[in-house]
Amino acid sequence: MTAVLQVEKLRVYYHTLAGPVRAVEDVSFTLNKGERLGLVGESGSGKSTMVLALLRMLKSPARTEAGRVLLNGTDLLQLSDANMRAARFAQIALIPQGAMNSLNPVMRIKNQLLDTIRYHNRNGRLSQATMMAHIHQLLESVGLHRDVAEMYPHELSGGMKQRVCIAMGISLQPKVILADEPTSALDVVVQRQVMETLGRVQEEIGASLILVGHDMGLMAQFVHTIGVMYAGKLVEVGPVEDIFEEPLHPYTQLLIASLPSLEGKGVFKGIPGITPSLLNPPSGCTFHPRCPQATARCKAEIPVLQEIRPGRWVSCLLY
Amino acid sequence: MAPLLEARNVSKVFGSGLLSRQQTVALQAASVTIDDDTPSIVAIAGESGSGKTTLARLLLGITKPTTGQILYQGRDLRQLDGPQWRTFRREVQAVFQDPFEVYNPFYKVDHALTMPIGKFFPKASAVETQQMMEEALQAVGLRPEETLGRYPHQLSGGQRQRVMVARALLLKPRIIVADEPVSMVDASLRATILESLLKVHKAFGISIVYITHDLTTAYQLSERILMMYRGNIVEAGDVDLVIKAPQHPYTQLLIDSIPLPNPKLHWGQREMQARQSGDHLTAASCRFADRCPQVMDICCQQAPPLYQTDARRVVSCYLYADAPVAANEHATVA
């Protein structure tokens, strides 16, 4: 197992007038070649912020305060702006949330795909014909007809637009693909098709993938490893089967219990309480106000993410 | 007693008229009834493009049907006078899917709550208004002190959506039409929001029309379900029958594609076909014919009627042509 991406103690704060909002707090994890990591967490847990931080696409008042992001040994956070631009999409690519809304409505699909390719082809080695052939191949690899290249986004269905965004993400065969909720608001049938496409192209180009989302069902079907985020911290990491069979962190346990199932009618097990303020986080463990297993120690001590068994990491004073 | 809210054989066609060359039939001959005496929860489920949002908008009186009628307490919406329309507007509330679009970004979110209070409870004092807002927010799990006074862009999508549900609850309506209220919201929050809808239904007798593409939550929340595909109701009835023992090939496909939160049970045992181009298909054919694994010749010639395969279920599929044709437009009532 070779590590492709190593994130070490990443910290991202939003500097607001009221003070720093700790959106991502000391997050560390490793992504191996070919691996699919699912990052789950409530909205506001820091998942999307972290994805943007990895790509250095954060906007003020967000700022990466500390940490390293090693992509095949190179720290992305230390690269010059020019080198980072070269790395984006060529080494590490993004399939953004709400992908259907991120296409330019007045540009044909082919021009949007060409945009990325042209930037990375500034020395003009590839001819127009070669680039167009590449685009047709790309579209076919995501299950779209090559005629889609001539269309405008409004002529495509939601699932087709999503697949165009996948095509954009893989167009330069990056080593790491970051997919931020690529199928939210798509219906299950299209979702399955889109995810199967994504999985297939990921394997074809030998990339690693981080899937950010909150659909545990989708994670169960798609990823190898799950990382659970809460209030900006990684609270549990482990292989997907283990997480479902034996969730260790109380938050993970509640999360899995809250999943809707076709077994129980009228039973809704939401997680009690409200997501914590990241401006004034609770003392000690940020989850203690909502944790059914909290003790006095949890209010005072901050737990650390520890590998308590090979491959299983938990950040909880119970362990 | 007349049903509370009823769609009677409604169709909606977009793009009709002299200059529009292409017409889109968004909805065809759909009927759904919400009873007046017993509050109920009915789910309307389907893919995007199935017509479920169009049906919701018709029920809310936001759009007018091309043919057919929408009736509130037995009266056609088009014939309601001023006060009757106001009553309709107060008693039938909506929660929409996109927590980004529904807000006017120039106003703080308080505005979304104070406006309906001002309109329907004009005599409420400032203290009463504040109290109503706080109660409604707490009912959906939001902290009033961290929500009120903020602009929409300062809240997360999940928070914005919950404010919208709070808004719907404020007026203590008789029906809430929720169009995909939790599809853009987290799994753990979904449970909380849906639970508050269920609580409100039980505590105040509010009927709920839950429009969704998520069959699991539809199963958990509702008693009845209408499955829609490309503008037609393909299967409808008791939710336990339709979801646990689906009869229409499309329902079967959908249920098979649900990603189960169990890594050992792989989704999609069933073969899926992308839509084929159908030269043999016409506007009269069954709308699922080009994707149906069990398609027959008759399906391409004419769309099937709704067959009553069970006292509490109807299916629109020739596979069940042995069953009696569903008696009337109210066939989609359990």
Image (cartoon, rainbow, N blue to C red):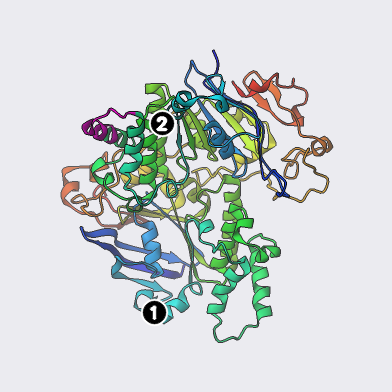
Q: Cβ–Cβ below 8 Å for labels 2 and 1?
A: no
Is residue A310 visible to the viewer in this orientation of the structure? no
Does the rendering let one see residue A18? Answer: yes
Residue A96, above or below B138: below
Q: Is residue B330 left or right of residue A79?
A: right
Q: Residue furthest top?
A: B1
Residue that mark 1 sits on: A81
x and y, in percent, of residue A26 in the image: 28, 62
The spot of residue A261 in percent (x, y) is: 48, 36
Callout 2: helix, strand or loop?
A: helix
The quadrant holding residue A24 is: bottom left
Of the pair A158 and A306, the residue shown nearer to us: A158
Q: Residue placed at 40% from the left, 63% from the top?
A: A51
State which region is magenta: B121-133
Give the overall secondary structure of the magenta segment. helix
Task: Residue B257 in the image: state x and y as whole percent.
Answer: 59, 44
Foreground pick, B316 / A317: B316
Identify the residue shown where x is 72% and y is 44%. B291
Identify which amino acid the numbered label 1 is placed on.
Asp
User: For this view, does A119 lie left or right of residue A296?
Assistant: right
> With respect to residue A171, does B6 lie above or below?
above
- Image quadrant of residue B243? top right
Name the residue beneath numbered marker 2.
Answer: B197
Q: Residue B300 at what x, y percent from top left?
A: 81, 39
The residue tagged with tag 1: helix, strand or loop? Answer: helix
